[in-house]
Amino acid sequence: MALMDRSLREQELRLRAVLAIFSRAEQRVARLGGNVGWIGPASDAYGLGVHALRAELRVTGDHLAASLAGTVNALSASERGATSAPGCG
Amino acid sequence: VADGLIVSGGGSTAVATAELFEQAAALRQVINEIEECLARLTTLDGAISAAELRSWNEPQAMYAALSAEEKIDEAVGALRWARFTAQTLVAALDASAESYGAVERTLQQLNQVIGAKLSYALGFLFPGLAVLLAPGLAGAALTVGAAYELSPRERREALRHWLADQNDVLTNPQLVMMVRLGVMGADDFLGGMARVHPQFIELLGDEGLELLGLTTSAGLLATVATPLGALAETPVRVDRVSARTDKTPATTFEERVRRIPQGDSQVRIDRITVDGAPDRFEVYIGGTRDLSMAARTEPWDMTSNVHTLAMGDAGSYRAAQEAMRLAGIDANTPVQFVGHSQGALVASALAGSGDYDARGLLTVGGVVSQRLVPEGVPWVAIEHTDDLVPALGGNRVAPDAVLVRRQAFLGETVPSDTLLPAHELGRYRETAAMLDDAQDGRAETVLDTLNEFSRGADTVTSTRYLSRRLPN
């Protein structure tokens, strides 16, 4: 089980690194304006595209946060199991 | 966009607002970041196998870890969608900039051809009219010029105020475009008058070998006007008027535009001392000070404007050369040029002369003739589309130069307290500051080159030079 714990710890660290990079991308997209000098339908379509990108990144962010939470929970559960196992009290 | 900057050139055929290029660059970074996330998540995905997890006899831990795996897969899927959306947006922005550039180039070529044909036809069909009108027009121009020169100061001021009241018309992008086409068509008009075959004029003119054009028109104007006492060149004298040592060189476009002299002195030269390297210089040249057609004491006048355009022996050009000689600049000294209006014309002529080791050029509101365009010198040209003065230089043909355009009075009332407000140095400072804020990739590449020139500067000594015309 120690091997599993080590793998999960590494997964947690890697997920945190991914989240840091992802957060930069998300902030960059949040700063994008909807206006690039176009007028009319083209401008609306671009604004819509930026909006869709923000929504997709929000969904991605939720998945990444959930995977990190799952990893942390697995680690905690594993540690709890180890401490409550016979002979470990 | 209010205050929108349009950026073109820099070796690219794309033309668009700085905002568009900025967003395309941001989206490219987003795509890179998404790809890095995807690469990291993909390697993570295989780190713990599903079989290993299922064999784990800690049910709570196992379910949490399996759920984490599932969410990683979903995050990968969502990231791929986001990457596709970002790539689509970048492709749309690039296509828009390319098609805008193509439409603009086509329209410019079409306008030039139509303007040239119309000018030729006018010259061909109405040469008598031109000959008939020429003495009258020349007489009227001379009378008006003489009256202006001889009139009391208040009258001149009144005339300036009257012209400034017409700023709504004079500061109109459509008028500016017509003036530009008129300038480009001057040689065709004369060709029509002289009954030269139109294809021969086309071959020699701006649409062909570019042997005829603004330079020949300006030369002809100077030749015709000189015997009448106008536009006659004189010797010039240059004096050093002040010197002071600053701590830092200019690092932004706005700072450089701010250093262009506006008072009596017409040239400022910054000597930049860099440890372990030869001294280098930034030459700042101011705009036209005197609008009269007859040369008086000011070399930054219309006489110099016409002679520099004609690639002749202009007083302001000689004065700038002399100031550079006094500062210690020779053919091997690294030098950069910054100029406004006539200063931009002189700066580009100096940079393109081949007499100096020109390392960079920044021009604002410049009447820059096509023949003066320096090749291989990093160059940013800022022009207002409602400024009449740059239009007098005709169409620009310098694909490597980064051209930044902005309508200074878009959605604003044009003030009538000064003549041609869109040409004022203060307005160009505003545009230069916007360009600094826009962080446009092409302009930033040139700015980096300009700044590299003075990197590691120990001291910067600024010297101002005043020039005056001497009697012949």
Image: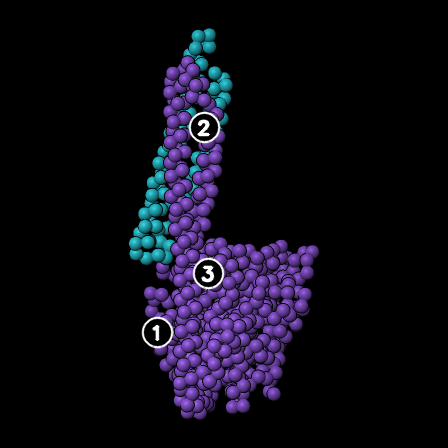
Chain colours: A cyan, B purple
Q: Earlier in the sequence, mark 3 or mark 1?
A: 3
Q: In this view, does B147 lie to the left or right of B453?
A: left
Disc 1: which residue: B168
User: Secondary structure beneath disc 1?
Assistant: helix
Evaluate if marks 3 and 1 touch, with contact meaning CB atoms under 8 Å apart. Answer: no
Q: Real-space Cα distance between discs 3 and 1?
A: 27 Å
Residue drawn 45% across the image and 22% down it: B49
User: Is there any visible trace of residue B279 in the rendered image?
Assistant: yes
Disc 2: which residue: B45
User: Is there any visible trace of residue B179 in the rendered image?
Assistant: no
**Relative to B11, residue B243 above or below:** below
Q: Where is residue B428 in the image (x, y as percent from the top left)?
A: 46, 66
Nearer the observer, B446 or B24: B24
Q: Which amino acid does label 1 sit on?
A: Asp
User: Secondary structure beneath disc 2?
Assistant: helix
Nearer the observer, B142 or B28: B28
Closer to the eye: label 2 or 1: 2
Q: Quadrant of residue B285?
A: bottom right
Residue drawn 62% across the image and 80% down it: B237
Q: Is residue B221 left or right of residue B107?
A: right
Q: Do labels 2 and 3 share a chain?
A: yes
Instruction: Please tell me how crowded label 1 is: few (under 14), some (14-19), or many (20+) other residues with Cα within 10 Å.
Output: some
Q: Which amino acid does label 3 sit on?
A: Ser
User: Secondary structure beneath disc 3?
Assistant: strand
Disc 3: which residue: B8
Q: Quadrant of residue B296?
A: bottom right
Q: What's the chain of the residue with tag 1?
A: B
For the C terminus of chain B, the quadrant is bottom right
Q: Is residue B256 left or right of residue B75?
A: right
Q: What's the chain of the residue with tag 2?
A: B
Residue drawn 54% across the image and 63% down it: B379
